[in-house]
Amino acid sequence: MSAVEKAAPAVTTPAIGQAYGGGFVTGITRDPATGKRSLHISAGAAHELVGAWGEYGVKIEGADSFTDSLANTQAMAAAGSELAVKVLALDIGGFTDWAIPARDVQELQYRHFKPTTEENWANSRNGDNPNSEPVGLLYSEEDPVQTLHAAFQEGGAEAFRDTWYWSSSQRSADIAFTMTFGDGYQVSGAKYYELRVRPVRSEFID
């Protein structure tokens, strides 16, 4: 190890649930194409929005990533999504790069901030997250458990509601990925549904 390396301060990744970057640390993904790692931060509950994903029957180019929330949301906004425009306009703690979470970023929100004590929906690909660190495995009825972070537990100030939330990951011209935060069921919803969004922002960490 060189003298410069010895003198360099250690870089510590903030812990899950820690207040950081305008919100709360949510987890890490690695982009499957570039290999770059990103730290994801969820906004507080006060900044949730509700709306339709976009126009039903319209396939939006560039809104298909499972990890790049901002690129998806920018593509949605360019195609006329009012919900995406509202999220991109957010200024929280001086940060203005908020987005609708991509599918695998949203999975981390549930994995680490599950509000309820309900059994998980253990079927299909619920919990499967090959792009997260550590890699997310299929949920069992018992895992994940209710979050240990009190503010995110049901009734807490930052808790997700026991209802459906949009991701920014499009599945077809008609539907996009959604998730319910009561039991972790991941499915697709028609783009005209009025669902909730918990904004996120991301930072490259290497």
Image: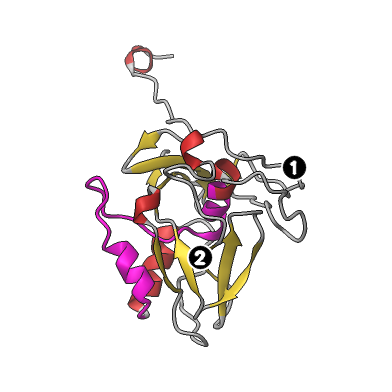
Q: Nearer the viewer, residue 161 or 66?
A: 161
**Residue 91 in magenta stretch:** yes
Q: Is residue 28 magenta?
A: no
**Percent from the top left, x then y, of residue 114?**
58, 45
Q: Quadrant of residue 54?
A: bottom left
> Residue 51 versus residue 90: which sits nearer the camera?
51
User: Does residue 75 lie above or below 7 as drawn?
Assistant: below
Residue hosting label 1: 142
For residue 32, say whether it is visible. Answer: no
Report the residue at 50% width, 34% height from top: 150
Give x and y (percent) for residue 37. 48, 43
| Rendered-image quadrant of the N terminus | top left
Q: Judge from the rendering whether residue 78 lies leftward or rightward of residue 184; answer left or right.
A: left
Residue 183, given in percent of the width and then of the height, sits at: 66, 54
Q: Is residue 96 above or below residue 29?
A: below
In this view, the residue farthest toward the bottom is: 57
Q: Which segment did they paint magenta?
A: 80-109
Identity of the residue drawn at 62% across and 40% down:
146
Under mark 2, the amino acid is Trp
Element at label 2? strand
| SS class, disc 1 | loop
Find residue 181 and report its horizontal and vertical position in percent: 58, 55
- Labels 1 and 2: the sequence-earlier one: 1
Neighbours of disc 1 within 10 Å: few (<14), some (14-19), many (20+):
few
Q: Residue most toward the front?
A: 155
Which mark is on residue 38?
none
Please report the residue visible at 47 percent of the width from the left and 42 percent of the height from the top: 156
User: If the image is split into quadrants, where does the C terminus sit?
Assistant: top left
Q: Name the residue carrying label 2.
A: 166
43 left or right, relative to 106: left
Disc 1 marks which amino acid? Answer: Glu
